[in-house]
């Protein structure tokens, strides 16, 4: 085989290379036109817009300058694939050549006033926009999401995360509020809540999780985990949930694959509850009869650190007027204060807001406690009348 390859003439090798190029182009064209039809329609429309703008420039350069070519170039970067974009740029380059020939430097002052010069500024503007459009097209091609559908997909993902974080309706005598505020005002957060009523609706199970990272960096992992945790919740006995979640996180093998989580199991008939924690902050229980807050700290390691982790729960009972508060570290941790100080501040503000009325207390509490903290914040309040 090596001797035959070496014996091939340069003409034969050139024919083989030309054949491979033609086959690649043919397959690309077939794949392109097998799409939904909007790609090649957009390409044809933008390609026709280039000579139209060129004619307008020739007819009235004062109203349609050569830099108007940035319109199809920019739209092409948003709508077209890189291969089609290169063809569009070739047409735009030809249009610039025509404009330059027509609007080239004129020596006659009267003619110059009627026909502005084709200066290098217009070419640089069109070239810069073309480079930016090509970068956008290559990014979209790598991600595999069309520009006109990418925003819809992100909106759908955000709504799914919001719906999964809803607390189910509770029977009379119980109230629950959940507030979630991503870092930096973004739409995605590394904190999430999944909740469900199990045992025929008698038991409320809620899981508050804080994924490593914050904002958009942790949002994709939080979305995946919220779906997995929502499927596990209620499908397993309460004491098997955190071990199963830990195993799921270990199987992902993420570089930043750890998370903290607290699992609440609340009997809506008796008010008895159990908190199981995976490296999460303790919950706070307001005992209305005594007028004090009790710290409910369960023991357990972070999720996704090692196999065979054990999680020990802590029990309590919510009586009339009691409040249970679960939260993530974004509400109490800050570089300039320790954890104890942050929890004392949270408890103090909670007493002030809850006495005004339970409705809307979660959102007001988040804003009052951590308005200057650039971290994801989540808060779950459960109250019994």
Image (spheres, rainbow, N blue to C red):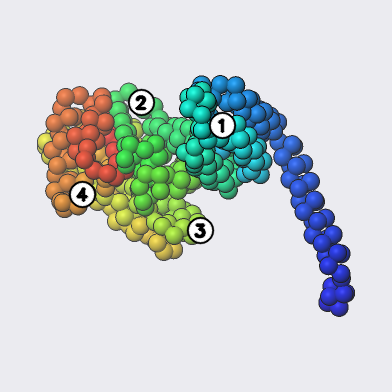
Disc 2 versus disc 3: distance between alpha carbons? Answer: 38 Å
Q: CA distance from mark 1 to mark 3?
A: 65 Å
**Residue drawn where x is 20% and y is 49% of the image:** 334
Is 383 placed left or right of 91 in the picture?
left
- The answer to the question of whether label 3 and label 4 lie on touching residues, with beta carbons closer than 8 A, is no
Mark 2 burial class by Cα count in 10 Å: few <14, some 14-19, many 20+: few
307 vs 137: above or below: below
- Would residue 91 appear left or right of 278 to someone viewing this image? right
Give the residue at x 48% y 46%: 224
First along the sequence among labels 1 and 3: 1
Which residue is label 4 attached to?
334
* Disc with the residue nearer the chain's start (2 vs 3): 2
Q: Which residue is mark 1?
A: 103
Q: Alpha-carbon distance for marks 2 and 4?
A: 37 Å
Quarter-of-image position of residue 269: top left
Q: CA distance from mark 3 to mark 4?
A: 32 Å
Quadrant in the picture for the N terminus:
bottom right
Residue occupying the point 62% across, 38% down:
97
From the image, tell me which residue sits under label 3: 251
> Where is residue 153 shown, x and y percent of the image?
53, 35
Contact (Cβ within 8 Å) of mark 1 with mark 3: no
Q: Tag 4 or tag 3, which sits nearer the N-term?
A: 3
* Mark 4 neighbour class, 10 Å CA radius: few under 14, some 14 to 19, many 20 or more: some
Residue 168 is left or right of residue 21, and the answer is left
Compute the Cα span from label 2 to label 1: 78 Å
Coordinates of residue 278 in the picture (x, y in percent): 34, 54
Q: Nearer the viewer, mark 1 or mark 3?
A: 1
Name the residue that disc number 2 marks: 171
Tell me where residue 145 sits by quadrant.
top right
Q: Which of the image's four quarters has the C terminus?
A: top left
């Amino acid at each position: 085989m090596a001797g035959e390859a070496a014996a091939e003439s340069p003409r034969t090798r050139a024919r083989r290379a030309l054949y491979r190029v033609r086959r690649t182009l043919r397959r690309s064209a077939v794949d392109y036109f097998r799409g939904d039809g909007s790609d090649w329609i957009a390409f044809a429309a933008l390609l026709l817009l280039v000579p139209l703008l060129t004619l307008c420039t020739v007819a009235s350069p004062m109203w349609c300058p050569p830099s108007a070519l940035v319109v199809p170039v920019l739209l092409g970067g948003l709508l077209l694939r890189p291969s089609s974009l290169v063809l569009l740029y070739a047409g735009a380059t030809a249009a610039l050549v025509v404009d330059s020939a027509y609007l080239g430097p004129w020596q006659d002052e009267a003619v110059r006033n009627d026909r502005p010069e084709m200066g290098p500024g217009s070419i640089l503007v069109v070239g810069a926009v073309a480079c930016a459009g090509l970068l956008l097209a290559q990014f979209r091609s790598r991600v595999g999401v069309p520009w006109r559908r990418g925003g819809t997909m992100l909106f759908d993902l955000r709504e799914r995360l919001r719906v999964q974080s809803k607390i189910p309706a509770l029977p009379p005598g119980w109230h629950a509020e959940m507030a979630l505020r991503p870092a930096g005002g973004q739409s995605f957060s590394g904190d999430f809540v999944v909740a469900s009523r199990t045992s025929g609706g008698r038991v409320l199970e809620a899981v508050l999780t804080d994924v490593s990272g914050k904002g958009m960096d942790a949002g994709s992992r939080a979305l995946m985990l919220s779906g997995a945790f929502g499927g596990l919740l209620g499908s397993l006995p309460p004491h098997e949930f955190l071990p199963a979640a830990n195993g799921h996180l270990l199987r992902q093998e993420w570089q930043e694959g750890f998370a903290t989580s607290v699992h609440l199991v609340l009997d809506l008939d008796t008010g008895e509850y159990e908190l199981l924690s995976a490296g999460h902050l303790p919950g706070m229980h307001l005992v209305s009869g005594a007028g004090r807050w009790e710290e409910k700290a369960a023991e357990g390691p972070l999720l996704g650190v090692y196999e065979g982790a054990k999680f020990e729960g802590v029990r309590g009972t919510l009586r009339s007027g009691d409040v249970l508060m679960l939260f993530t570290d974004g509400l109490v941790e800050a570089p300039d204060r320790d954890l104890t100080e942050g929890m004392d501040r949270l408890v103090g503000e909670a007493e002030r807001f809850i006495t005004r009325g339970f409705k809307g207390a979660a959102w007001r509490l988040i804003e009052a406690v951590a308005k200057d903290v650039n971290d994801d914040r989540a808060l779950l309040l459960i109250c019994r009348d």
